[in-house]
Amino acid sequence: MPGYFSKMINGVASLLTVSLAMFSFLSLSAEAGALVPAGTDGQAPVLMPVPSSIQLSQDKFRLDEKFYAGGQDQPGGRGFKAVARFMSRLGGRTGLFLEQDFLADQTPGPNTRLFYKYERVGRLLPNEDESYVLEIKTERIELRAPTDLGILRGLETLLQLLSSDDSGYYFPCGRIEDRPRFTWRGLLIDSCRHFMPLEVIKRNLLAMAAVKLNVLHWHLSEDQGFRVESRTFPRLHQMGSDGMYYTQEQVREIIGFAADLGIRVMPEFDIPGHSTSWFVGYPEYASAPGPYRIERGFGVFHPVFNPANPATYKFFDRFFREMASLFPDPYLHIGGDEVEAVHWKENPQIQAFMKKHNLADNHALQAYFNLQILKILTKYKKKMVGWDEIYQPGLPKDIVIQSWRGTQALVDGARKGYQGILSNGYYIDLCEPAERHYLNDPIPPDSPLSADEKKLILGGEATMWAELVSPETVDSRIWPRAAAIAERLWSPQEIRDVEDMYRRLRVISVQLEEHGVQHLRNQDMMLRRLVGTVQVSSPEMGALRALARICEPVKGYARHSQGRKYTSLAPLTRFVDSCFPESLEARDFRKRVEEYLSSRQSIKARALENDYFLPMTTIVAQTSGLSERIPALKEIKPLTEKLRELVFIGSDALFYLKSGKQPGAQWLEKQKKLLEELKKPQAECQLAIIPAVEKLLTALEEGKK
Ligand code: ACM
């Protein structure tokens, strides 16, 4: 069966060749794009999101240690603090000892080179002006904006423009005029399925600001946890959180931290379903008697508020009065998704209530509940936001519907005059490629909506549901893919070049580390922990890392059906958790295969052998040893065996393609069947390089026709 190439790699190739080849693969696979500094001569600038208008020239503003920034803000002002952070980051990226004291007066003086000016302090509300104009001349940079929010957005752009050449660092001269396409550009963080400590929220807020996201949608109550201190109803956090909740002081700290970054914080309290944790301390408001315990499993559960009990609304009146004063944002999210009616059906009192009020079905009962909640929120000057299930005729037009089940709900809502935000297609917990999210547009080019209806689409939100993430893995599920969503929501509709997005995403991903997000670095840490020592020979460690880089966790919710039952107590420390949701190495490999197939140049085939197939053989050899010695890595043994098979298929196919010889029909059928077997998940992972090998087989098959 094995052809020429696989015989060669089993026998002839010297150890030296193999290990050198592995190093080239490893260096290729280590943040390949990051090796290209942002905006180095000859490269298009790495801006993400792409501004609405950009003109750059060949001239350069040269950066030196006498670079001073000045504007009208006082210490403590949002602009002042943003400029101080900018200077610190600029020093950090360049190693320059910038003379300006972070806390110095920013009044413009003779040394000032960066001037910023705005008209007024921006309000943290939808439709606030975030536009700016950035002008870079050889001796002077000007950043002007109607509000200080525009100054913040412009500073991020300026920092992304930082470039280098043989003479040092510089900003390219030119003019950028920029404004967001959508006003609501959010990230949902679920602090309930797994609690996310304060520092997780803060580092992600900083990263959000770097890509101009402006809403933190904070999912704060769920079956698995109630995460905010309530002084009115203290048993909520005392009995519903395992002690893992945010104090009101901490909530205010986050809100202030976000406000300094020009980010709104919208809380979500998910009712009437998804609410088990509330009932641990307050079973009297549930539809069934209880007792209740904090849910450990994941899914949709029966506990649900009792909409027929007047005490429920008295409870919510007091609860929302407290939360309305804690959270200053005018919007408050009430969830409303996935209500299970089992306890409603089983409760005769609720059934009698429905009859009495002519509530024909459960949806009508939930609509009744929502209307009572709406009255309470209105009383406390909050506008209601909910998942698309909350829609019902007659709701006031200032509510916002968040579409998660499909884009049609967004269209239907807008046609009826409702504001909407899109999350369907932005579920980053599903571990799908950035490309898929990037091309998902809240208002696609073929949108059936009228111009007025389109105005009701406020934007979108990436959703980081936390069933399968912990504080140490959550960043890797958010970044860098959320940056692609940030671009979709900020940049003009025509900016849709996927290749260019990936070129920039690799660089931005590394820049984001400046804020402490751990999406890249934690992979090594997690692999070290599995191996149990840093003294393991480095080829083995390197090979394990290289293996992780060509594997992806299974997509969607498939991890829940791979044989292990996940709960909020399950370890998220296995090999699969260390793998990135999208393997950029696999993407590169696929591109290289495509390039070979379109050119059929033998030099490109040889490069595939040397840069990919040979190093993969070494990965197999090295990681097989690890998987035999280390119990926690036993589960990857079959994965490495699959990789071995895949290398045989790929290198044999390449041999046939290169030589022009035809394989027998039986051989081809057999390989195709094998490939289908290899696609089945192993250790909850899939080999992300299978599609590229499949392309080689397909090319062979088509050549036979
Ligand atoms: C949701 O994903 N249930 C909003």
Image (cartoon, rainbow, N blue to C red):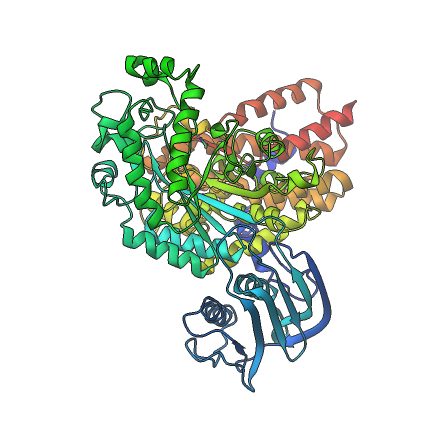
Residue at the extreme bottom? 110
Percent position (x, y) of residue 71?
53, 76
Residue at the extreme right? 705
How many dots with numbers?
Answer: 0
**Which residue does the image show at 58% across and 32% down from the upper left?**
413
Image height check: is 104 above or below 321? below
Residue 162 visible? The answer is no
Q: Quadrant of residue 255?
A: bottom left
Q: Quadrant of residue 118?
A: bottom right
Quarter occupied by the N terminus: top right
Q: Nearer the viewer, residue 336 or 173?
A: 336
Residue 692 visible? The answer is yes
**Which residue does the image show at 48% across and 38% down from the upper left?**
620
Percent position (x, y) of residue 16?
53, 50
Percent position (x, y) of residue 529?
33, 46
Image height check: is 467 above or below 493? above
**Which residue does the image show at 47% across and 37% down from the upper left?**
429
Q: Quadrant of residue 560?
A: top left
Residue 513 horizontal side relative to residue 487, left or right: left
Residue 27 horizontal side relative to residue 452, left or right: left
Percent position (x, y) of residue 624?
42, 37
Q: Quadrant of ligand 1?
A: top left
Image height check: is 296 above or below 241? above
Q: Nearer the viewer, residue 34 or 46?
A: 46
Q: Nearer the viewer, residue 337 or 40?
A: 337
Quarter occupied by the C terminus: top right
Q: Nearer the viewer, residue 511 or 495?
A: 495
